[in-house]
Structures are given as C-alpha cells and as structure tokens.
Amino acid sequence: MSPRRSYDQYCSAARALDAVGDRWTLLIVRELLGGPRRYTDLHADLPGVSTDVLASRLKDMERDGLSTRRRLPPPGAAYVYELTARGRELLPVLHALGEWGAPALGELRPTDAVRAHWFALPLLRGLEAVGAGEGLVEVRLEEGLFHVWLGGAEEGPLYGDGPAPREPDARLAPDARTSGALNRGTSTLLEELREGRVAVTGEGPLAKALREV
C-alpha cells in the first residue's frame, strides 16, 4: 500500500481532502451508499476508472476507516466492500456537492455515461424537502428502475438498483424532461408533483402524501 499523501496543513478541510480528495473516492462512496458492493459491480458502475486505480482507492478508503471489506458466506463466497459509520457521514458532503454541481450538468452529452441509480441522491433530497414521511419508494426512469429508502436508513442502504425488494410504499415515474430538470436543479420535486408531472401510484400513506402535496 502506498504511503498516505497529505497536504500537511493544520486545517480540517485539508485533512478531509487528505482522505477523500483523490479522484474517484467520493464516487466510490456514492456507490457504497447503496449497500455492500463487489469489486466487479463497482467497476461496472464507475465507467472510466481503471482496475488499478479502483483497487488503490478501495485500499486507501479501508486504511482511512471509510470502508471495510468482508467475505460473504457460502454460496456467495465473494468479497464485498461497504461503508463504515465514518464513511456514511459523507452523505451530507455528497448532497452539498450534488446541489452545487447541478447547474453545471446542462444537457446529457453523447460522451456522458448514465445509470438510473445516480438519480437516487438528488431524488432523496427532493423527497426530504417535500416532507412526505418515511418509506420505500420505487422509481422508474427511461434509464431503468431503482428504489430509495426515505428516512430511517441510518445503517442500511439508502438506495438500490432494480425493483424494490418488497411492495413499495409509493411508486414514482417522472418523465425525461422532469428528471432532467430535477437533476439540474432548475425545478424541485415539490413543483413537479404539484404540476402533475410525476406519476405517483400506491395506496399507502406515503403515496397519498405525495399526491396531496
């Protein structure tokens, strides 16, 4: 393992950047907020990262107490990476970076990779701002399905790829224009819900609350 690089500045921001300032580190955190991931899964959802750089960043994150590696019991018998409590504390940092970076998104470029679950964190911010309560929400985009846990997920995953693992408390289906506007920060989920541009289905309290905002 390479020695830890440091700015050697007695400043909390500099200390934070010692741990997460390298390219790809915060994006690995973004992926691990969705729960334990295998190395191959991380590599598939971080297009552009080399295998050497990904392995190096994961080792650095483990050394710095941001993540751990554990072996799944049989029949899985694979290693997975997951965030520690210290690593999960980076969620507000990613929220702030996402809000700050939203105006720079612009339109999707031909060279831009995209994954449905990359919309999970902006959507969580929007759902929390609406204040509709807690529950499991399944979201359908043109890019695919994902699900998010709203509230109460202090230790478990915040989101996941694919259909919800159980009957969701609400299902959302924003159209392409709406999901783009929410990603870029040019509109809010509250505005889109009130304008009827996000289809909400489900009979639970969360779905009803989202329809009545």
Image: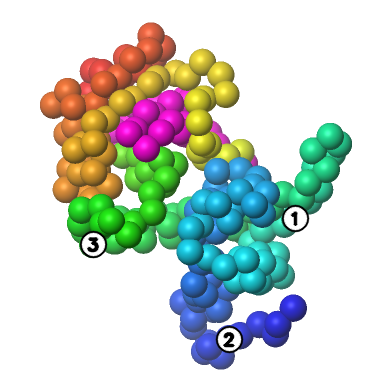
Residue 39 drawn at (x, y percent): 66, 54
- Which of the marked residues, 1 or 3, is nearer the chain's N terminus? 1
* Distance Cα–Cα, label 1 vs label 3: 34 Å
Q: Which amino acid type is shown beneath numbered disc 1? A: Arg
Which of label 1 and label 2 is nearer to you?
A: 1
Q: In the depicted view, which residue is nearer to us: 180 or 96? A: 180
Q: Which residue is mark 2?
A: 6
Residue 194, quarter of picture? top left
- Residue 168 in the image: above or below residue 12: above
Magenta segment: 128-155
Outermost residue, front side: 110
* Distance Cα–Cα, label 2 vs label 3: 29 Å
27 inside magenta stretch: no
- Residue 52 in the image: above or below residue 105: below
Q: Secondary structure at mark 1?
A: strand
- Which of the marked residues, 1 or 2, is nearer the chain's N terminus? 2
Q: Which residue is mark 3?
A: 104
134 relative position to 174: left or right: right
Q: Which residue is mark 1?
A: 69
Q: Secondary structure at mark 2?
A: loop
